[in-house]
Amino acid sequence: MSFLKNIFGGNTSNEKSENNEKAKFYTLNSNDEFETIDKVSHQKPVVLFKHSTRCSISRFALKRFDAEYNFTDEQMDWYLLDLLSFREVSNEITSRYNVVHQSPQIVVIKNGKAIYTASHDDIVFEDLKQFV
């Protein structure tokens, strides 16, 4: 309830959202943000989480991911995309990083390239530990 309201409550990508003690993400709502993502990905991994607000599987995967995510800002950044509201940004992820569109989906970016992707029940927080 308030979790989703906090996620999509209008944060810009320059503001991190803190919905609980562990959840820290940037909202991804513009193609202009990919230059920053690519630049940061040369210092640390960046996770893009593509979320459909109309899908219960996506909602469940996001809640589980959010509850388990515990990387520090120095270890990893994650961006959350409401792909229904920002379809063109979702399309840019597909094009820029050469990944097949799925939802829900995470894409790990390192050195400006997608190095890992998972969707649906394959989104497992533990898998991200290999990238830090």
Image (spheres, grey):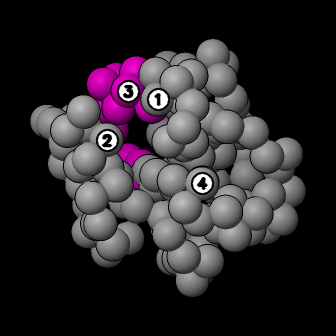
For marks 4 and 1 on the same chain, the one whose residue lies earlier in the sequence = 1
Q: 59 and 112: which one is in front? A: 59
Residue 21 seen? yes
SS label for mark 1: helix
What's the CA distance linking mark 2 and mark 1?
9 Å
Classify 10 Å Cα crowding around label 3: few (below 14), some (14-19), many (20 and above).
Answer: some
Classify 10 Å Cα crowding around label 4: few (below 14), some (14-19), many (20 and above).
Answer: many
Tell me the residue that label 3 is attached to: 63
- The amino acid type of the residue labelled 3 equals Lys
Tell me the residue that label 1 is attached to: 59
Classify 10 Å Cα crowding around label 2: few (below 14), some (14-19), many (20 and above).
Answer: few
Q: Where is residue 61 in the image (x, y as percent from the top left)?
A: 50, 24
Q: 44 and 78: which one is in front? A: 78
Tell me the residue that label 2 is attached to: 4
Nearest to the eye among marks 4 and 3: give it. 4
The residue shown at (34%, 55%) is: 8
The residue shown at (38%, 26%) is: 63
What's the CA distance linking mark 2 and mark 4?
14 Å
Residue 70: image tag = none
